Amino acid sequence: MTGTRTPPTSRSTKRVRNRRGEGGKLGEEIVATATAILEETRSPAAITLRAVARRIGISTTSIYDHFSDREAILAALADAAYVELAAATANARARFTDPVDRLRAGCRGYLEFSRNRPHLYALLFTTKAMPGAPQGSRSPSDGAAFRHNGDPGATSFGALVQAITACVEAGASTSSDPFADAVAIWVALHGYATLRVSVPNFPWPPDDSTFDRIVLCLARIRPSAAP
């Protein structure tokens, strides 16, 4: 028998219609299917309305009841990834009570997420679903606005601000602006995670050494409080 093999992004299934009142499940299925396509192809470009519809076994027009366009699907995918990232860092922090240990654990959870879900992590920075900054002048209390504005990425970032603040309150950090220091840590961790993938042959120092240089220095942790 001859023929061509159907690629993963174009196979379809016979779908059972949702029962009355279960229309919301299709929206979740669309996001889950888009995630599967991303993991299989390693390319956000493969996530198209047609590819998602074909995989689920629905018409392309059915997607418009839940998402206005492809960008809306990618934004929902990024939101779900931020929720997963926030859970990963929160679970990491929950294993510790000391504020410095909690800060380090949360930051390690961030790096582990970037390594374990590299394509989802990269998607976070290729869509418009970025952490939203509060409007107006910035102050050290901006972390509270990030924690409570409902944006998944902002919630994750707000937890980092709060972790540094806890170190300050415990006398373990000399930070006078946890928000600004959290920005510095986020930038450094993202740069480190990205460069480790894109420049693997660079003679990188040991991970633990680089990690502590980033987190402990930028969070202004007192030497006496460092592990």
Image (cartoon, helix red, strand yellow):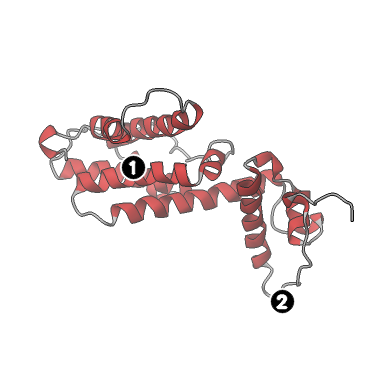
Residue 151, visible in the rendered structure: no
Q: Residue 123 at x, y = what percent?
A: 57, 40
Q: Quadrant of residue 160?
A: top left
Q: Which corner quadrant holds the C terminus?
A: top left
Q: Quadrant of residue 1?
A: bottom right
Q: Label 1's element?
A: helix
Q: Is residue 84 left or right of residue 158?
A: right
Most extreme residue toward the top is 202
Q: Residue 74 at x, y = what percent?
A: 63, 46
Read off the residue under disc 2: 19
Identified by mark 2, the residue type is Arg
- Looking at marks 2 and 1 on the same chain, the residue that comes earlier in the sequence is marked by 2
Q: Is residue 181 left or right of residue 152?
A: left
Read off the residue under disc 1: 107
Q: Crowding at label 2, few (<14), some or many (≥20) Cα neighbours within 10 Å?
A: few
Q: Which residue is drawn at the image coordinates 45% and 37% (left, top)?
A: 133
